[in-house]
Image (tube, coloured by chain):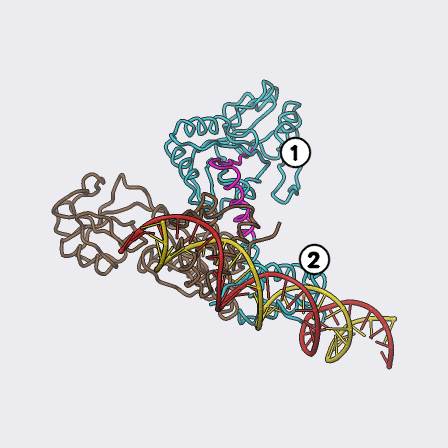
Chain colours: A cyan, B brown, C red, D yellow
Amino acid sequence: MDTLETRELRYFVAVAEELHFSRAAERLGIAQPPLSRAIQQLERRLGVTLFDRDRRGVTLTGAGRVLLDEARSVLDGAAAAARRTRRAATTTHRLTLATKAGSNHELLQKLLDAYAAEPGAAEIEILLCGMGDQARMLRDGRADVALMQRPFDALAGFDTEDLLTEQQVAILPAGHPLAARTSLSLAEISDRPDLPVARWPRPDGSYEPGPGPEIHDQAQLAQLIALGHAMAVLCASSRSWLWNAHVAVPLTDAPYVTTVLAWPAHSRSRAVAGLVRTAAEL
Amino acid sequence: MDTLETRELRYFVAVAEELHFSRAAERLGIAQPPLSRAIQQLERRLGVTLFDRDRRGVTLTGAGRVLLDEARSVLDGAAAAARRTRRAATTTHRLTLATKAGSNHELLQKLLDAYAAEPGAAEIEILLCGMGDQARMLRDGRADVALMQRPFDALAGFDTEDLLTEQQVAILPAGHPLAARTSLSLAEISDRPDLPVARWPRPDGSYEPGPGPEIHDQAQLAQLIALGHAMAVLCASSRSWLWNAHVAVPLTDAPYVTTVLAWPAHSRSRAVAGLVRTAAEL
DNA sequence: TGCCGTGATACCGGCACGGTATGACCGCTT
DNA sequence: AAGCGGTCATACCGTGCCGGTATCACGGCA
């Protein structure tokens, strides 16, 4: 059973994405004939036809679609392997922890303090990233561990340790009528024309349609809420960065949010294991 | 940023496992000098020394240990990619579901029935495997989805959908004094010389030391319990295969067991997605 | 029916991979 | 201390694969 070479997978992905041999070859910086040959060779080795070369164009077969997913995943893994190895060599005994900027400050502080007290603890570097970038950082080897939130972040492919489960709260401008309440339901805060819910960007950078303002970072969100132009739903620990002009009201029927420590599933790093152990004992 | 070739990774893993260039070369079926050269080349390309070539032998550096994990994971991924692609080509529109033999019969039946009723449902092949083999089957591409149990099975690296959470029960021989109870605690059933807890094999095939009998499959377990030679702790749905000579008593303080549907994290197969959707609606 | 554009084929050259021979170095033995 | 066995590195060479150029086969289109 001969194993696939990453060169073949790179070539295959290029063709599968372009659905055009000449353009794919150009993108790869090689000529078209060698590319055709490489793909044929790959198909022969697998014993599977990956493309239908119809007149009027090239299309993926079912097996081709499967291989496209798989190949991307393998190539990402290989790139991550190189990056992680390089990082391990240069920044010895150092962990990079990715976290959403500004969230879960107390929890992070507690984790770092507890870990620092461990014997043989590694230095920890904090990598602040925006909305859901932690998964990418973890996947491509720029970070060793990350703080993420269930059910918001995509945890697929990672190993996790639950750290903290908390209620969600509505963040309102202090003067608003709802701000006086001691608790709220989702129905009460949705579709209010006077106070729309702010919209975060999705992983691909787009926004889902809706009345609320599009926001990019927490500072902007804080400002908008303080001005009375929007409200937001966040987890309870966000209270730590609220202004005087903000009020947090618990939401009784919103799903609970669990903050987890996540790391690549196959990681066997001693330092990661140590951090996870202290996290589990928090 | 040049990407690693799987050939280099294969060579590296061989040397890292043997810690001996000549033996590794023999295992790879090549001569020693080309292997030395390939490793040097890899080290140059990464800009990282992976081995300490000390007198009295070769040892892995820290970065080398990292790369060993990563390389194994990438190679496994590449092998799985080939296998999944081949399977996709030969067994069109067919899903392979791995599950522990005999467990969760009702749940599986319900899932299969519900899925079969979906329009455009794929055929489903059931792959019965022993203790925790599902993870391997899923990882190496022999299965598309699996039924697994939290917290028993290692779910790292998979995407999951919770199906059913249930209590654990103690399975006792009908005549035993404890069998008359309506509930039990873990403390009450542990370390009983008259009725030891049966021991399952671990993933590596070994058994942890203890007084109970070593068992291999469910039939054997059922027999031993019926004979009054052992007891076992299982999840409540195991009741479906109990004999008349067995009694199941709920355990009040044992952790709950969640049966989940698991699939490779990066899978985007239409058929898997369909099965997951129906599973989520159960 | 030319013409363009597509992917496939034919052929060739360079280079990287693998093989053989040998070197450098170390530890062990006598 | 010198010889020996063992290990990895170096030197050198041949070959096979990869990639390039030229060209073919074929379909769509004016």
- Percent position (x, y) of residue B73? 46, 53
Q: Chain of mark 2?
A: A
Reply yes or no: does residue A84 show up in magenta: yes
Both on one chain, marks 1 and 2?
A: yes
Can you see residue A113?
A: yes
Tell me the residue at 40%/53% (across/down): B19
Q: Amino acid at mark 2?
A: Arg
Q: Residues within 10 Å of mark 1 (few under 14, many from 20)?
A: some
Q: Is residue B177 above or below residue A55?
A: above
Q: What are the residue bounds of the magenta stretch? A: A76-100
Tell me the residue at 55%/66% (across/down): A63
Residue designated by label 2: A27
Residue designated by label 1: A215
Query: Which image quadrant is residue A221 in?
Result: top right
Q: Chain of mark 1?
A: A
Q: Residues within 10 Å of mark 2 (few under 14, many from 20)?
A: some
Q: Is residue B226 above or below residue A208?
A: below
Q: Amino acid at mark 1?
A: Ile
Can you see residue B134?
A: no
Q: Is residue B157 above or below residue A47?
A: above
Q: Nearer the viewer, residue A171 or B261?
A: B261
- Percent position (x, y) of residue B263? 46, 54
Tell me the residue at 25%/58% (across/down): B216
Sooner in the amino-acid sequence: mark 1 or mark 2: 2
